[in-house]
Amino acid sequence: MTDSDAVDDLEEQPPLREDPALLERLRHDGEQVLAEAFAANRERFWHLVTFRMDRRIAARVDADDVLQEAFVAASKRLQHYLRDEGYTLFIWLRMIVAQTLVDVHRRHLGTEKRSAGREVSIRGNQYPQTTSVSLAAQLVANQTSVSNSVQRDETGQALASAIEQMSPLDQEAIALRHFEGLTNVEAAQVLGISVTAASNRYVRALSRLKEILEEMNLDG
Amino acid sequence: MDPQRKYNRNPVESIASDYAEAVRGGKRLSVDSVAEANPEHESELRELLPLIEKLEQARQSHIERPAGLATLGVSRPDRLGDFQLVRQIGRGGMGVVFEAVQKSLGRRVALKVLPSSLLSGDEQLRRFEQEARTAAALHHTNIVPVFGVGQDQGFHYFVMQRIDGHGLDALLQDPDRQLTPPQVAKLGAQAASALAYAHHQHVLHRDIKPANLLVNGDLDLWITDFGVAKALEAEAVTQTGDVVGTLRYMAPEQVVGEADVRSDIYSLGITLYELLAGRPAIDDSSIRQAIVTRRPAPSPPPLRQLNAEVPIDLETILQTAMSNDPTARYQTAGAFKRDLEAFLDGNAISVRRVPLWERVHRWGKRNPAIAALSALSMILLASVAILSSAGLFQLQAAFAREQQNRQKAEQIAEVAVGTVDQIFQRFAGGMENTEPEKEFAAAPAISSETAEMLENLLPFYDEIDRLSFSDGVGTPQLQQSTAGAQSAVAELHFSLGHYQRAIDTFQEMLREQSKEDGKSGEEQVQLAKLRNRLGFAYTMLGEDDTAAQEHQLALEMLMQMTSVNEPTDVAKSRSTRFEIARTHYLLALHVLPGMGPTAMPTVDVLRSTRFDDRAGLPRGFDSEFGQPGGERSRGGPLRPDGNQRPDGNLRPDGNQRPDGNQRPDDSLGPGGPRAAGPRLGGPRLGRPRPGGPRSAGPRSAGPRPGGPRPGGPGAAGPRPRAPRPGGPGGARLDFDGLGGPPRAPEHQNQGQPPPPRRGEGRDGQPGGRRSDPARVENLQIAISILRELIEEDPENLSYSLSLARSLRQQEHDARFRPRPEDGLSTRESVVLLRDLKQRHPRNQTVLFELSEALADHQLFSAGDPTYGDSIMQLTEAAETFTDLCEVHPNVPKYINAMVHTHFKLAMLMERESQEATQQEKRELKSQAKDALRRSVDGYAAQVQMHPDALGYRAWYALFLYKDGKNSLSSGFYEQAIASLQNSVDQWNQVIDSKPDEGISWRALPDVYRSLGQAFEAIGKQKEAADAFDMAAVSQQMIDLGR
């Protein structure tokens, strides 16, 4: 595995701005266009929320409620986006959903989680400090992780523990593609890397997962 | 975005994407065909595609039951059949209720939609539909009409009339809305009337409770969810795990599944009681008690005691309705209703007050109750079963036995104790706490969940206790069990590294057990043991002073006893002497860095990770790496070879440390034997921070802002679009202009050393605990007592293990080093433990201690005749630790040992590779890399599990740094950057929590420098420059500190 990522950065950037035509429509008919965009990506956002939501919160908060709140937040902040669009609309909406999720966590767990000296045994993966999950640093305690999501499935047991053994970066690569259901280009946008790098990273993560699974087979 | 644009993608990725897409869409492509169609990637695809399928399956199974909760899945449907969903109006355990519009009729209805997971089986589905259809046939003013059931898009739902009202549960939660007795009677009469009608139609409700009684503003009442309970109740309990909640309104006989009309009457009575009393008729502890004792919960207190406004007649009516004995209740809902109406009209009611003596008599009739309670216990089991099926079977057996015997009431409590004890034994490995002599394979893995569950079971002992006093059941046994259970919970927390919680429990036990006087000798030993456990837990937290106090108290207690003890009482005095020996050992014990949550790496370890920069070995490497990463207060002025340590005794600036932090050498008395002297520094200094804007103002205590850290160390990473308001330039400005930051001048004016120095001062202090004569003496005493004990009782494993531990500590402290011609195995601790392993080949504790001893020795330099043995011993230890970690993935003790041993191995191999041939070099390097990788991975998990344990985090940061450097030197630049950035982040987190911990400050410049090199290597000049700037800035911090 060489490190081609860095070189590719320059040539294969994913789109960093939204299509001007869509922006124009957003300016004129914001609510409607926003609603369409949100609806079109609803399923993936739902996955983001359910996969990354703390179990304790999941018992109280429906993913739908989070999405509802996120949409309201997006409508409110639409003007900000239009003034300073450094992202595609999808990436921006995803950020809002993630931020809303952080807020929900904070609301439900905030004080409890941060009280000093309290030893919270956490289950969940630490995500790297990428843009995609800088929120994870805040959520990390008790977050439903990729591995947790698969754990309940008995056949998924091995898979879960294999995923757990991967580096956070690799985990994230798998999470974005398989659990959030993003495309390669979207994953690249989220991770802030080139499309080529994202595809390499994904394949690499898969290979590593495969290796770990094989090792586990040998061991057990 | 432009979907048409073609990117230069990894071809395998693009094939894999299509494949995943297909799997997600339900298409089944054969791996063969895809692989054959792409011959150039065939083998890779054959490997990866099945994996993709697995991942997609996992995704699917998650969608169906996220977090084990009822959900309607990804997309809440907008419409189901003829119904347009308007909004969600309620969410219960079993389903979600929507307001909906039936399009064909244009009417508003309520739709209760059940998640598909609730009705997974055919049988279940059939039952549900049958029940729902029966319910739909009910037509009564006080029953929510069910229009029908339906199924669409995989959802089952039933359609009900939309009622403009609320569940009585909502009303109960509103303290301002207390209903009057006549109002409650009116509601009760309506409900009873509905029940009478339904019962006449041969339909039972089975789940009468406040939430299922809807009321509008005029106090009209509707019962909802007829029959649903029967179809779903088992599922609901197992899914929600709410045993107590489920049982609160349930008649005793119903729990066994023997519901009849009188069960509904009972539930209604209980509900009405709650409305008047303002609290549940049966509280949670009574329900738990009922589960444990397998007797019905005692009757609630007379209503009028709680609400004086309730007339006697109404109290009598409800008392009748909710009698534990079905034959004593109203036999029909109609009779219940008539009495409520008679009460409202001021007429005479049909039932009389039950005299007190008769209540007592009825209470005694518990034939039906015993049967009922076995079912209660089954429900308890349902929740326990989640944790272990093995435990479940044991319990079932216990209950089955009990059911056959139908023993007398007095014995029931005993059985209950035994049952709960069994759970504890199963999960906590018995009550034996100090020397868990468990077989490797047989020991159940322990986890936080287990601890949690056991903790929840503790109140059961209280319930039993309360009962046994009234029943006169022998209490000593119970007390012993309770203490045993408590200590099992504490030990579990201890093993899991939840030291504070262990301390809390130990202290509570101490309080309870210290209450009574006149303890027997054995009880006193137990008490001393408890104190020692408490002290040990404090030691793990790094609170040495408190720990020493506890041990000292224990010692005093034990010493008093030995003088009192009959000299003939050999057995007793032996256990006393053993505990004395242990106390001395514990007084000498110190936590090695990395072995406890607060034990930080030392400067020397840090320095030794750098050695591959230079050709030779770092100075002091030998001694630093003698232990898993040195020692909290290292020092050891003498080395066996007689060389003075180059940098151990002198501070970098050449000044001898003031004695402030030095541990007094001898005094080990209570009240601060290990007390630190006045700490340097006084109030915590405002900390200039490398990182631009953050250092400029007072730090906010709040959570770190969500976005990228502007200008912070993280910003040096590859984040092309991240805004960078601050940046290293800004940071430097802050430091250059020391007058700028508000609190910076304090440094200069008061001449106080900044944080790095203070931390280092403690670490680098000469003459630490090791040379403390009191410690040496304590160990000697412990060892000589233990030797005597072993002579008297050679078979006692605990004695031998304790001796081995003490010896190891002694060897460690004396920096024992065998003569080359004797080989490494001459260490007595190792010899002893090898012998123990022969005798107890699968004993977990023996294996662990042996590995500890093997891992805990000096590392020798290549060329030393014992050098190869070193590697072999470490490898052996590492393997055992890895095995232990696999069996017990949540036990920090094992993880720490495993991780640090691998780290040591990595360092050793790397060092060896310096002198190896080219061929060997590569092999050794790769082995070292693997070992290091294991350390990093092991600690990633550890840090997640214990986010507040700064010691673990600092070590993790250190491992990451080393790993980053490794990757750097072997050309994996991206990996290097990831590790190094992570390392920076971890160090910063340590600094955030504990700014005066010098080690983090010491580490940062090196990490940044390496990061800069990595960026440079891939041509990212700007990032590289930033990182070097940060290195300079953080170096400056240290220099300033000096």
Image (cartoon, rainbow, N blue to C red):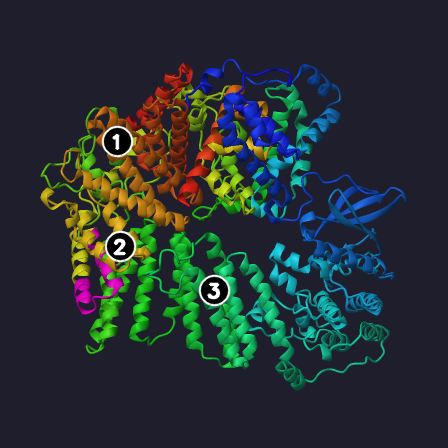
Amino acid type, mark 1: Glu
Point out residue B154 in the picture as x, y percentages from the top left corner: 73, 44
Magenta segment, which residues? B785-808
Point out residue B988 in the picture as x, y percentages from the top left corner: 40, 33
Point out residue B400 in the picture as x, y percentages from the top left corner: 55, 72
Q: Which residue is mark 2?
A: B672
Res. B441 mark: none
Any magenta on residue B807? yes
Magenta stretch, main secondary structure, is helix
Are there few (<14), some (14-19), or many (20+) residues within 10 Å of tag 3? Answer: many
Give the spatial CA distance, label 3 vs label 1: 48 Å
Task: Name the quarter where the C terminus of chain B is drawn.
Answer: top left
Point out residue B140 in the picture as x, y percentages from the top left corner: 87, 62
Note whether residue B708 is visible.
no
Q: Nearer the viewer, residue B827 or A28?
A: B827
| Residue B65 to residue B719: above or below | below
Any magenta on residue B81? no
- Sooner in the amino-acid sequence: mark 1 or mark 2: 2
Give the spatial CA distance, label 3 vs label 2: 41 Å
Q: Which residue is mark 1?
A: B910
Instruction: Look at 19% across and 57% down and name the residue there.
Output: B778
Q: Secondary structure at mark 2?
A: loop
